[in-house]
Image (tube, grey):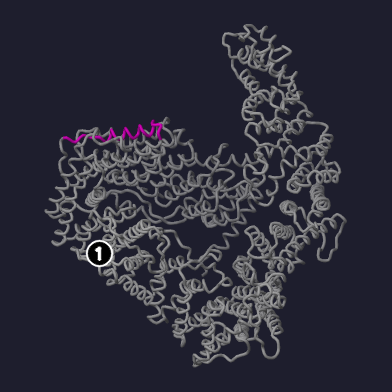
Amino acid sequence: MHTTPRNIHALVRILKAPSDPPSADGPLKIDIANDAWLDASFGAVKKAEVLVEWLLGALGRDGKRDDKISGHGPLSNPKYWALLQQTLSSSASSVRPLKTWLIPLLHRTNLAGMVKELITLSHAHNVDLDGLYVPARAVLAILWPLAEKRVGMDGLMECFAAVLGVCGSWNDDLAWICTTVVASYREVLGTFGNKKKLYTSFLLIHMPHWIRTLSPSMGWQFLNIQSSREDPSSKTPKQLHDTIYRAGIDTLFSVEGLKQPLDTFLDALSRAGADYGFNILPGLFSARLSAVHRCRNTLFSSSSGSTSSVLATREAVRTDAMQFWESCWRVLLCDALTTESGVRRTDAWAALVGVLAVIESERLYTPSSTIRTGDQNTAVHRDTESTLIAARGLALDAVESAGQAWNSNDMPAVTLAVDTLDMFTRIEYELVGDELHRILRAVVNLPRPLSVPATDAVQRLLSNLLDYHAKTRTVHAYILTLLTALSSFSLPKSVSSQFLPLPAHDVVFSPLSSHLSSLTRTLRVALTPTQSAELGPAVLEELGRVWKAYAIERGSDRPSGKRRKIFIEEGTPAEEHIDVGGARGSKCHSLAAAFSLVARVSGTVLASLPSHAYVYDAQHSGIVCDEVGKLGWDIVWESIKHEQGGPQEVASQNQDDSKVKRRKKRKRGGKQQDPDSDDRLGTDEVVASAALRFLYDVRARFVRIESSPTTVTLGQSDVLGGDEIEELLRVVRDESTRAELTLEIIRTLFAQVSQTRGFQHAQASAIIKTSIDLLSRNFSPQSRWCGSSAALTQENLGVALLYMLVDRWLGVTDAVAPEEVLQKFASLLLSIPLEQPFEVTDEFDSQPSSHSVISPYNILLLALRNAQFWELRNMRSAFLTFTLKRTAPLSSFSLLPVSTGPSGPDKLELVRASEVYTLLMYVPPEYFTRTSRAELVKRAVSGDVAICSVLRGANDGGEVDSPQIADGGCDMDMDKESGSEVQTFRELCVRHLTIFRAFLYRMGQFTNGLDYNTSRAYVEHLLQPPASSALSSDALTRETLNLVSFQLSTLLRAQNPEAVTEAIDILNRLLAAEPLADLLSQGPRKCEFVRSVAFRLIGCLREHHIPESLETVIMMALTTLYEFFVSVLLLEGEELGTNDAFALSEHVEARSYALSFVRWLGADIPGGVVPIGIKLATMIMRSVLHIRLPLVGTKHIRTCPGVLALLFEELWCLPDISNLEYLETIAALYSICGTEMEVRNALDIQVAKAARELSIDYSAHLLSVIAEGIEDPRLPVGRCKSLIHLSTILLHDAPQGTLKVVRTFVTRCLDAFTGRPHLCEGPSELKEHYLELIANHCSDRPTALRSVDLGSIWSLLCKILSGTADHDTATSFAIFHYIVSIAGSLVRLRRDIVIHTLPHLAFVLHRLLLITKRARPQLGAKQSKLVAGTLPSWVSPSQPLGIAESRALSRLLTTLTVKTVPRTYTTQQHTAIAAEAQKAESLAQPFAKHVGHVLLAYIDCMNDPLCVLTPEMRRELEPGLFSLCEMLGEYNRDALMVSALDSGGKTIMKSLWREYEKQRYVGKG
């Protein structure tokens, strides 16, 4: 058996033995060393030194072994590292200091080789890496700082190479080891002499591994995409990744590296990065630029420090960067982007975009030639610009080729190609200006629908192009170029229009949709009057040209002579039909789509032109109104006639039905003609729809022009006669008409009706009737519409028509439609099922986005929540009439016990009628007529009775025949099994029951529609056990309790003998139910609902009634009810069932209401009542603070609101108790349980109710207890926040007569907040709470403020606003708003005391303005620290204040000039004096001498070279700054500029004053 050596010499001999283990069949040396270390009796002085020397030697020699990877050497054995960790970290390791004996030992140890082999072990598969690297990290944390200075560059380079070779999964300990080693490499590299040799070796040997390690995480950081903390492909931690990246950059781009030939670097990069080099190229480009800029004086020496030499150096840096770009393009990017294999390299395109982003952000490119003419000054500029132009050409070719093949798989590369064009636009517009038409045409022809990245890329490109033309005032030229590009739209020859995923002329799902809105905004601000007058005719001419091109192509498709019918056989494949004449049809369809796109843009442009651009005769410069209407309607009629198969006369009004039928028959036969004709493609209908849409857009612009000489909008050409309207209605009635054209015609006809005065159009009734008939024929509640008219079909045409009528033409429909048509429209609305429960209050966007799905449910909510809908008398009357008609079956049910026959109520009729009340929950009660309101209330009661009878039959075990389909299109989703059908129907009945009772409660709040007898019968019905057994949802329980308590309160308030009689009957029914019987027994709970009703009754009595106001008989019944509660009061703590949290909660609630009832009755407390509130509160507080089971703590904490209410009731009711103890318990309970947000609201409700009834002494004691807790520095932050929140509620609801108490408490708190370090220097969450307390107190009770309080407030705000070095990770915006609120309340409400502390106010405003600044991007560490030092701790430098904060501060500054009357407390003796002093004045005059100090803060922010104040924030601050300028005056302004401002500050002040002068009112108008 092995024994531990007893002396140090024996241990040394064993460890230095040549074999391991030292003896056969003996333990290993590591085990012997472990035993020796753990043996407490082995007390050798240098035991740790011997073990460390042996361990380091063993680990160092293991680097030369061949079996280290196999997991058998010391390096891979966790025992060696664990023992080394113990010996180094133990305090008893040696009597000598650690550095005394360890550093010489490290000089003899190859620590770098050891670390290298340790990192290499990450490749091993049979080694416990987690167990190995944990102690190894701890060992290296001690050894590496002592040895890194003597490791040497060669050793560090080997370690760095080992780090680059790690390919396994990373853990935190290995990542820390690698990060430490690479950081040491970077540190030594800074002082290393032979960097040229290091550069060469890194370039030839290590660069491929470096690129492979970094490239997966470097690909997208230059494309404005945030990377995650850890890249999923490389699994390299972010900190290690950044350290490796910076180490490689420092090696490659040192001064010696930058002096080496550039081709050498690029050749090595091309060899090393064949697969990964493109991802890292933007990073290398940016890093090299930063390095050249940092070493510019060394690389580009200048003779002097003059301005010209500095500019020359900057130009040399820029030229060097562009030469690097030219070399990268020539060596790497050009060949990768011009591959002929057909597969586009996405990484190469991403690298190109990243490099161009650096060029754009650093402003490296400066145009030195006229690109369009190609004149260059120097060879360098010629090469640079030629590479940029070549890259632009490749990107443009890629985008164009994507438009020629709509099923391309290269969309990611195409998206990056669009980004490339966008970058060229941002770098220099001249690079793309000569190819603008080609770019726009390529973008328009991109296949749709585009992906989200592609859509965003196109939108960015179009937005930047438009921004440039807006700045140069050439928007008119851009629009004409865009129209020309749209007119060149073409479909791929290999793709048929029928097989496109989206219609070719669709605009909604193209980037052009959002671009049109930007175009509209730009046209209103960037057009000159001359351009506006010239642009209109040019746009109209372009539209006419596109129409003529389409008409010519369509005419060439028509064969001369008699048309021959070619019928399609059923068995012929569709592809064969498409190929016949496919090129002709494709071209015609392309021209139709081009016309539609041009018409959409033309309508937007013409509708955005100013009014002076339109004229009414051709003698003036501009667009003639009549020409617009004439061109549009000529296109419409020509397209409609051509669609019918040839020229026809406009149909007359008296055309008989036989002719219409024959024409429909001919058209249906025509649809079976040549499958390749334009009739089959529907191009004429597309063109007609586009023309009508164009007219509608332009007409909407003319509606806003009041000087229009005619009642119509587009002149006489826009007036439709009877024959023309009948022709359009005939087209609409034709079932084969395209849905898009149908919608546009109906919208146009409604516009024609709306143009007449009073909607008195001759054919208005026919238009409305046809529209409603078409809507009814095509409407389905299950249909959805995406918002695009091009995507309309017969299935969703009804949804589009309904949305159009509800959103735009409700007024016309109400004024013109006959009563039967309105009834039909109302029935259609009521047929839409509500998919969400009525209590869901999610807002519906009244203007749905074009990309959102418009459903009938959305349209129904849009109508019901539209005030116009309810203000329309005819529409409202039709809606209510149809509602009464639909709910008529409910009148057959009654509260009286009338037999309904053996089968009971009809289930289908019941469900149909009940569905209507779901919609009625959205109707404002004021819009019901008195008769309809009363009738609907009675029917709701009847429906409630009917549903309860159905549920009673189901509970009794009877058969329930579930209806399969409910009216209104609401399919009952029943399962096939009978049991599940019954369950589903029962859930539906419970839902309708909830809606009935919610409706009755809502109507009752407005007016009570039930008589006393019915109210009594209905309340008894609600209290019936069969109904209560159906309560399967919290919503139904809540609505039932609301309804019962409301009806009881109504009967109690009524001063009527009949009401008293009915109330007595209800109370007797309540007493007969014995609401507290099951509470006193141990059995199941059966009276929960009745008990809740009793509790609601007590609460109602406490809030709305006094005993003297009720009849004697009612008081007798209430006294009898009180006797039931006496038994609850007599229960002691042991009988409450404290182990059952639910039972405990019920008992506590009952006891609390019992005491409240006793206090209301004024009765005496029974002698046997024992106070248990403190005992229960102590139990709950202990469970929250000390219990280990979260579930038990959660159950008890839910009882906390009831216990808090019980404490207050016992405080008021029970004699012989310690009031101070109760008040301390209340404060402690709230401070402990108030930290749980799930019960915070319930606790706040109880405190708010009790605070109004506290006496002055109780309020003083409670506030004193709270103040002591706040002042205690040992109190945890969470509990301190709860106490502050509790005091906020108590001050808000303080009882009368407590002004002195409140003043004393506030003064004490302010002193604590200002002078206690744990409060004024506490966390931001704590500051938010006590600032909220001060803000609420200043705004709610300004009369309680005193002058002594104001000093503490200013002192506290100054401390909170002072700068500090430590900051939170996230900014607390609430603190800023609370400070602004406090200052604003003081200025508005207590000007009388603020006027004595104006310097303090000026300092607070000065600090508020200073912290609105933000640091400039890309500051260094020291510069960022300087900026951060001026910010308070609650403002994070990475999350500066925003626009909302600037707006709030501006309102505060504006308040200084507002005249107000101070809110002060005065007695009757001082009323006359106070009235004389309290005049409406402002602080403008007294504060004028302090305004300069406040303005200095703004000037400092603007003049600080390290900070920036964004234009948006300056715009929000302008009103407040102008108020300061108004108070300052010219004299003080001049004094400020002379005494306190430098040249930069004077410039800023002049600019601000200039803007102030522009808006100042000078009294001349």
Classify mark 1: helix, strand or loop.
loop
Task: Decide: is 300 above or below 956.
Answer: above
Q: How many circles with numbers are drawn on the protein?
A: 1
Q: Is residue 1520 visible in this depiction of the protein?
A: yes
For badge 1, the amino acid type reads Asn
x, y percent for residue 423 = 72, 57
The quarter of the image holding the N terminus is top right
Choose between 1080 and 1450: the one closer to the eye: 1080
Residue linked to disc 1: 1008
x, y percent for residue 1098 = 22, 49
Residue at the farthest right position: 379
Choose between 524 and 444: the one closer to the eye: 444
Q: Main secondary structure of the magenta part?
A: helix
x, y percent for residue 56 = 70, 19
Q: Is residue 173 left or right of residue 148?
A: left
- Per the rendered image, the range of residues in magenta is 1168-1189
Assess whether residue 1446 is covered by the magenta stretch.
no
Q: Is residue 1258 left or right of residue 1268?
A: left
Task: Decide: is 527 above or below 100.
Answer: below
Counting other residues with Cα less than 10 Å from the Cα at mark 1, is it few (<14), some (14-19), or many (20 or more)? some
x, y percent for residue 140 = 67, 25
Residue at the farthest front position: 571
Residue at screen point 47% across, 55% down = 1457
Choose between 1332 and 739: the one closer to the eye: 739
Q: Quadrant of residue 837?
A: bottom left
Assess whether residue 1180 is covered by the magenta stretch.
yes
Q: Is residue 171 left or right of residue 1261?
A: right
Choose between 1329 and 357: the one closer to the eye: 357
Q: Is residue 625 visible in this depiction of the protein?
A: no
